[in-house]
Image (cartoon, helix red, strand yellow):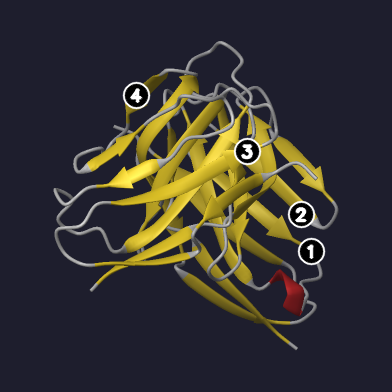
């Protein structure tokens, strides 16, 4: 059974820092790994999707990597801004899309 | 603009009542999903539908029911059999590429509906 874990549950950084969010999954037989952003009381917004054959995807200041053999994905955020404050969720897709619990990020001005 | 509309945004239910959450999309997506989100937990799949007039149970379907009479609409009914219905409910949709449950396609989410049992 696939399990997806995100550590830490919460993270607070000063503005301008580069940061890494971690996602681990137990079953490496996945189609893709997806990262989402969720603002308080809102739905999810897709950030990046990495296919199982890919190692990374980039969008602006965001870079997501995937290492299937170790069951890990990271989301790198460069030059963080207060507007990046949100909860970030990863989800591993095998037969189903399994979500992690999320990391709540706070970027302080 | 294309997107998913969920209504109502907030809903209060008395114990023993059934309530229905609306989900409408104008993205021409074949597949639609309902998730439940509780504090400190990841999203859990309630039901999903890959095509009109067909739907499948997810991981926590007990106490819920759905219908898919139109491609654009996938309403969720929370029945009185659901013992702990207070949660945030999210509807999503995606292109169905024939690989079953959302092969490699990005999900588009609605803004969510928060249900509280009084």
Contact flag, marks 1 and 2 (Cβ < 8 Å): yes
State whether discs 1 and 4 lie on one chain: no
Residue B41 is situated, as x and y percent measured from the top left of the image, at 36, 58
Contact flag, marks 2 and 4 (Cβ < 8 Å): no
State whether discs 4 and 3 lie on one chain: yes
* Foreground of the two, A103 or B107: B107
Residue at which label 2 appears:
A62
Mark linked to residue B25: 3
Q: Label 1 marks which chain's residue?
A: A
Q: Residue at x 25, y 58 (%)?
A: B85
| Left or right, B99 with reference to B105 | left
Q: Earlier in the sequence, mark 1 or mark 2?
A: 2
Q: Residue furthest top?
A: B98
Q: Label 2 marks which chain's residue?
A: A
Q: Residue at x 62, y 38 (%)?
A: B25
Q: Label 4 marks which chain's residue?
A: B
Q: Residue at x 14, y 56 (%)?
A: B83
Residue at which label 4 appears:
B56
Residue at which label 1 appears:
A78
Q: Residue at x 49, y 26 (%)?
A: A30
Q: Residue furthest bottom?
A: A109
Contact flag, marks 4 and 3 (Cβ < 8 Å): no
Q: Is residue A69 visible?
A: no
* Label 1: few (<14), some (14–19) or many (≥20) C-alpha neighbours in 10 Å: some
Q: Earlier in the sequence, mark 4 or mark 3?
A: 3
State the image quarter where residue A25 is shown.
top left
Residue A44 is situated, as x and y percent measured from the top left of the image, at 59, 53
């Amino acid at each position: 059974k696939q399990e997806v874990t995100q550590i830490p549950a919460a993270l607070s950084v000063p503005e301008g820092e580069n940061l890494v969010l971690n996602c681990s999954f137990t079953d490496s037989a996945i189609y893709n790994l997806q990262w989402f952003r969720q603002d308080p009381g809102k739905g999810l917004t897709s950030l990046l999707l990495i296919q199982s054959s890919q190692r990374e995807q980039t969008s602006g200041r965001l870079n997501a990597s995937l290492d299937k053999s170790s069951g890990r994905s990271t989301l790198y955020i460069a030059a963080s801004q207060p507007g990046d404050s949100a909860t970030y969720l990863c989800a591993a897709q095998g037969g189903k899309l399994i979500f992690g619990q999320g990391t709540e990020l706070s970027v302080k001005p | 603009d294309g997107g998913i509309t969920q209504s109502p945004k907030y809903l209060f239910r008395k114990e023993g009542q059934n309530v229905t959450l609306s989900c409408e999309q104008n993205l021409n997506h074949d597949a639609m999903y309902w998730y439940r989100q509780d504090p400190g937990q990841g999203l859990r799949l309630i039901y999903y539908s890959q095509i009109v007039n067909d739907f499948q149970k997810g991981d926590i379907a007990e106490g819920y029911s759905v219908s898919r009479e139109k491609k654009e609409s996938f309403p969720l009914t929370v029945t009185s059999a659901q013992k702990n219905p207070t949660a945030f409910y999210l509807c999503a949709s995606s292109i169905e590429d024939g690989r079953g449950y959302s092969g490699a396609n990005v999900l588009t989410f609605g803004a969510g509906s928060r249900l509280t049992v009084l």
